[in-house]
Amino acid sequence: MSEKLRPRLELEQAFNIIAKQFEFKDAHLELMSDGRQADLLTFIKEHFHPDEPVMRSIGYTPDEEYDQLITLFHKDNLSLVLVSDKTNEIIACRTMGLAHRDEPLDPSELENEKLVTLFKFFTHKHEEMNVYKRFNIETSLDFFVLGTHRDHRKQGIASKIFQAAMLFAKELGLKQTCIHGDATGVFSQKIFEKFGFETLHTFKYDEYKVDGEIVFKDTGIHKSTKVFVKKL
């Protein structure tokens, strides 16, 4: 049986205590809400997608199907966003959501072929990376998007919001769970490693082939996807 979160009011109170521990110049942390969903989607498409190695490599452009998946993944409103005090715009995010053993995503329901390609890549070693079996759990906390506005990078923002998310994860009320995340680029990989995550698997881009052809080419300095996990 999947675990349940603490009541929303308690989560908001816990988040507020955590948020006070972090200072940002002209910005503040917010816990995701329904009112921010559209802003988050726009932020991801403008400041995460253009630099995401595997999506850029195959020329995947977010469409309506992608929008629906992003909204579904973040429906629990557990993500942390950094919001500008001056413009009220999102300038960074560490998104996360619950995933359940008994509710896997069915790739046959996807229509965009490039999205199917991405899904197959991230799941092609499923049995070796099955965190539910590994930790004997029913629910995992999946870290999805770690992104910073292009005008605010190289300031340590991503590490700080990641740290805040780690603290908040411990307040969710989940007794048996783990944090799971796929990092497709070197910068996010360094942050996962900084916070003591175990590397469950490494997928080298030049070794992943379909019908004898390398799928992800021209990925620049990003040479692999690393799958990270950490027991809570």
Image: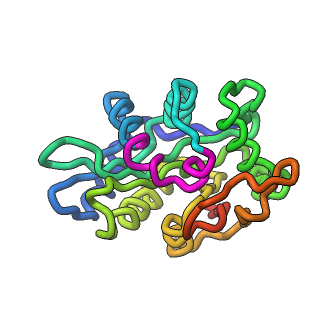
- Residue stretch rendered in magenta on the structure: 44-58
> In the shown orientation, is residue 67 left or right of residue 147?
right
Residue 150, position as x, y percentages in the image: 32, 56
The residue lying at 70 percent from left, 32 percent from top is 113
Q: x%, y% of residue 86?
A: 12, 47
Q: Quadrant of residue 17?
A: bottom left
Q: How is the image coloured?
A: rainbow
- In the picture, the quarter occupied by the N terminus is top right
**Residue 108 vs residue 81, the one in the foreground:** 108
Give me the residue at 32% from left, 53% from top. Answer: 149
Please say whether residue 83 is one of the residues in the magenta stretch.
Answer: no
Q: Quadrant of residue 148?
A: bottom left
| Quadrant of image for the C terminus | bottom right
Residue 3 placement (x, y as % from top left): 63, 40
Of residues 178 and 93, the one nearer the viewer is: 93
In the image: residue 88, left or right of residue 35: left
Estimate the x, y position of residue 154 in percent, counting from the top left: 33, 69
Does the magenta-highlighted stretch encompass residue 47? yes
On screen, residue 223 above or below 5: below
Q: Is residue 124 above or below residue 232?
A: above
Task: Give the residue drawn at x 75%, y 30%.
Answer: 106
Labels in figure, total? 0
Q: Is residue 14 visible?
A: no
